[in-house]
Each structure stands twice: as structure tokens, then as C-alpha cells.
Amino acid sequence: MRQKRGYNWRLGDSARKPAGAGETMVVTSQSPDDSAVRIMARGNFSLGAGGLLNLLLALTTVTLGLAVLLAWQGFWPVLLIAVVQLVLVSWILIRAWERAWVSELVIVGPDRIEVIRQRHKRKRQYQLEAAWAVVEREQPHVAWYGPRIILRSRATRIELGQFLTTAEKELFADYVQKAVKKHSAM
């Protein structure tokens, strides 16, 4: 069976899938010397750069084809409107594609826990002490929202997996809790 490869496929395979999910968005891997665990959660990102380009090319071909046909018959303002529409729709689709590109990487080592959040080109890093780390599940204030997964070390609190479904959050929290438990004194 061939493994699907997304934008972060090199990090490893998931050990189990949440109930009812086709493919999990949480993967985990161990360092070769067993000193660090890498846990990655990624957004449900089904359209790659090539797919987006193909979509935009198909939209452009159909829209400009019809607009040129109508412009040839004398309805030339349609061509101008079609170009403006293509620019606007392309800009919206590209911005939506960039916002869907999200991932969180948690690296749990003996001394430090590093959390790296990436949303397209923006990357933020956090470091916590492993000895004081605790994974907490907070119930939401609104009933239909999923639980919040908090990684806490001393006064630092980081919410993990905000973009995941409830089942994926639980899987992510289990992986992080198992990794943190090995090094935490709490």
C-alpha cells in the first residue's frame, strides 16, 4: 500500500486513527536514540499547490473563453468584467489556500519541550521546561465546541491543536501526555 504524501509526510506514521476518520492528521515519531519524541498535528489540507494552479487554470480557460466569445459578438464589457472577476477569485482562493496550511510540531525531550506552530510562512516557537510540564483538557464554555488541550509548564500555557476535530484533539493530547509523562515531575 502506498503512503499518501502531504507537505509534512517525512515525520512518521500514526499509530492509530480516531474513530470515524479516514486518515488522521496527527503523526508521531521517535528520534533514533530514543531521547526525543516528535508529534505533529496538521490541518486537513487536501489541495496542494499543483491542484490550486490547475483549478485556477481551468477557471481562467472557461471564463476567458466565454468572455472572448461574447466580446467577439460585440459585448466587449463582458471581457473586462471577466478579467476583474478572475483576479478577485484568484486572490481569494490563494489567500484561503495559504490560511489552510497549518501545522503544530511538539518535540518532547528530556529537558525541554519545543512547540513549533506554522501557518503557511509564519512560524512561532515556544520552549517549556519538561520537568514542570502538564497536559490539561479544559471543557469549553460553549457546549458544541470541542475540549481545549493545554500544555502548561510553570506560568506558560499553550493551547494545542485548535484546528483539529475533537477526536483528533484527543489523539494529539494522548500522544503529548504520554511523551511528557516520561520527563515530567508533576
Image (cartoon, rainbow, N blue to C red):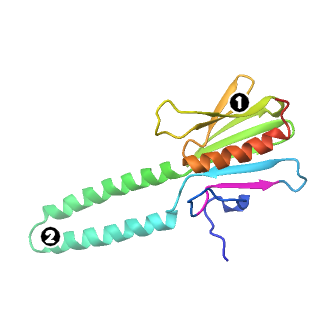
Q: Which residues are magenta?
A: 23-30
Q: Nearer the viewer, residue 125 or 164?
A: 164
Image vertical order of residue 26 relative to residue 186, above or below: below
The one of 82 and 106 positioned closer to us in this rendering: 106
49 and 132: which is toward the camera? 132
Identify the amino acid type marked 1.
Arg
Residue 25 among those drawn in magenta: yes
Residue at the left extreme of this rendering: 74
Which residue is rendered at x = 43% and y = 50% of the image?
A: 95
- Where is residue 117? Give x, y as percent: 63, 42
Q: Is residue 116 left or right of residue 29?
A: left
The number of numbered discs placed on residues in the rendered structure image is: 2
Residue 11 falls in which quadrant of the image? bottom right
Provide the residue designation for mark 1.
152
> Would residue 114 be found to the left or right of residue 56 on screen?
right
Q: Which residue is mark 2?
A: 71
Q: What kind of element bears circle 1? A: strand
Q: Is residue 64 magenta?
A: no
| Of residues 112 and 90, the one drawn nearer to the viewer in this rendering | 112
Characterize the local packing of mark 2: few (<14), some (14-19) or many (20 or more) Cα atoms within 10 angstroms: some
Quadrant assignment for the N terminus:
bottom right
